[in-house]
Image (tube, helix red, strand yellow):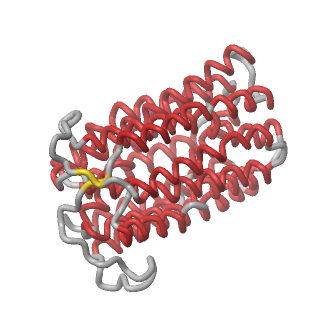
């Protein structure tokens, strides 16, 4: 049984409930592990396994979308049992067990299977973890709390990619264009160490919190019994997210391939991702605090506007320095949108059904990114790289117009 502890006697960290910091630290270690290896998957598929871009899009879409149903189920189940931590720990554990099998993957089907298993774990943990964070804080702290979590999560991504870049530099040198199987396998086993530490930390230092409100019975099933439970604003927000995520390319796969397409050496591609995550980490907390003051809607509209311009920039890029600039701006977009959108879900959902709300949120995002990844890969192969980015930019622009005109503060 998961322990439920009182908030009394627990010192705040950075002015917030300790659960926020320790879930952030867990995410930091997990992202060190994941970013060491998973950002290299599109390059491994094309450089080593010689897969076409349609397969890259499929694997990328599955990487983001295969967990959609599991996120919805786990969020609903955490509401039903009134516990968040047990599902979060289970999810982190599943992902940790899956990662070493990338060492053995010698065909794109094996890579797809590992990514599916990893995302299953993410699906089990994400909704319950975010609900636990939201349960641990007050309404006025949501932007700051999710901003801090995104900062720590992205700091882990920064460190993980930096480690991957260091290995590439030491083994292959600075001018190598293509990834090799040996470097990929080295990172595949090394990434297990921080993943195991993350599971141990989550189990020991993160605790359930006593609900601040009397619990209400969870819906019978995630897609039944929810009519009238959530506000119209919540459903409109999900529709707008669906539009945006049909054009948001999965896991940066296509922007990574765009960089290599323009002749960037492998080390430079990884350093571009380091830049992206450095900007993302530095700006996430300030953007979360800004959303507490200005409102989520305005900040999200700003983020999607930047995304539109960045993807037009990727489409028009003709030299490597253009891609460097676009990667930096993409980090600003991510800092604005990723944490703030999670805080907005907490604003729009009843506290006792927050897990279900996050499950629906992640389900919509995941399914749409899965479809968008496949479509993006086909467009890349049949029309060209620029068309893929124009497609994403157009849908982002529609999402920006939607949140400005259809949702009121």
Q: Nearer the viewer, residue 273 or 212?
A: 212
Residue at (63% x, 57% y) in the render: 61
**Picture quarter containing residue 225?**
bottom left
Quadrant containing the N terminus is bottom left
Depicted 288 relative to depicted 78: above or below: above
- Residue 107 in view of the camera: yes
- Kindly give the residue lying farthest to the front in the view shown: 1
Residue drawn 67% across the image and 36% down it: 40
Identify the image quadrant of the C terminus: bottom left
Residue name at image x 66 percent, y 20 percent? 167
Q: Where does the image place residue 372, in percent across and percent down from the top left?
A: 59, 61
Q: Is residue 296 left or right of residue 202?
A: left
Q: Nearer the viewer, residue 177 or 389?
A: 177
Where is residue 41 shown, x and y percent of the image?
Answer: 69, 41
Residue 326 is at least partly visible in this image? no
Q: Is residue 210 left or right of residue 88?
A: left
Vertical comparison of 154 with 169: above or below: below
Is residue 384 rendered to the left or right of residue 130? right
Q: Position of residue 305 (x, y in %)?
A: 37, 50
Q: Residue at x 59, y 57 (%)?
A: 120
- Residue 151 in the image, given as x and y percentages of width and height: 36, 36
Residue 375 falls in image quadrant: bottom right
The mark total stands at: 0
Q: Is residue 385 above or below residue 79?
A: above
């Amino acid at each position: 049984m998961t322990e439920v502890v009182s908030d009394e006697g627990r010192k705040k960290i950075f002015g917030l409930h300790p659960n926020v910091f320790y879930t952030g630290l867990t995410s930091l270690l997990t992202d060190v592990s994941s970013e060491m290896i998973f950002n290299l998957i599109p390059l491994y598929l094309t450089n080593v396994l010689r897969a076409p871009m349609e397969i890259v899009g499929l694997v990328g879409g599955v990487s983001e979308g295969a967990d959609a149903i599991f996120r919805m189920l786990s969020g609903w189940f955490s509401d039903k049992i009134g516990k968040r931590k047990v599902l979060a720990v289970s999810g982190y554990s599943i992902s940790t067990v899956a990662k070493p099998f990338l060492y053995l993957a010698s065909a794109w089907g094996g890579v797809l299977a590992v990514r599916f298993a990893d995302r299953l774990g993410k699906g089990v943990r994400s909704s319950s973890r975010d609900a636990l964070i939201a349960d641990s804080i007050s309404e006025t702290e949501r932007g700051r709390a999710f901003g801090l979590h995104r900062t720590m999560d992205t700091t882990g991504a920064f460190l993980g990619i930096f480690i991957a870049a260091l290995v590439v530099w030491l083994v292959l040198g600075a001018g190598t264009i293509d990834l090799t199987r040996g470097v990929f396998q080295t990172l595949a086993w090394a990434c297990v160490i921080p993943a195991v530490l993350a599971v141990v930390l989550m189990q020991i230092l993160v605790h359930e919190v006593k609900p601040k409100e009397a619990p209400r019975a969870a819906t019978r099933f995630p897609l039944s019994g929810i009519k009238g439970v959530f506000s119209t604003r919540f459903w409109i927000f999900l529709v707008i997210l669906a539009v945006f995520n049909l054009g948001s390319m999965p896991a940066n796969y296509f922007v990574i391939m765009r960089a290599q397409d323009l002749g960037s050496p492998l080390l430079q591609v990884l350093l571009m991702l380091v830049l992206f995550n450095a900007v993302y980490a530095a700006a996430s907390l300030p953007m979360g605090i800004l959303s507490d003051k200005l409102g989520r809607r305005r900040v999200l509209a700003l983020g999607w506007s930047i995304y539109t311009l960045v993807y037009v920039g990727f489409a028009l890029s003709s030299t490597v320095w253009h891609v460097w600039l676009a990667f930096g701006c993409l980090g600003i977009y991510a800092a604005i949108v990723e944490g703030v959108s999670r805080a907005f879900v907490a604003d729009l959902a009843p506290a006792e059904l927050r897990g279900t709300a996050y499950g629906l949120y992640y389900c919509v995002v995941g399914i749409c990114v899965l479809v968008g990844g496949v479509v993006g890969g086909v467009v890349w192969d049949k029309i060209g790289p620029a068309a893929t980015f124009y497609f994403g930019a157009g849908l982002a622009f529609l999402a920006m117009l939607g949140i400005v005109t259809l949702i009121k503060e």
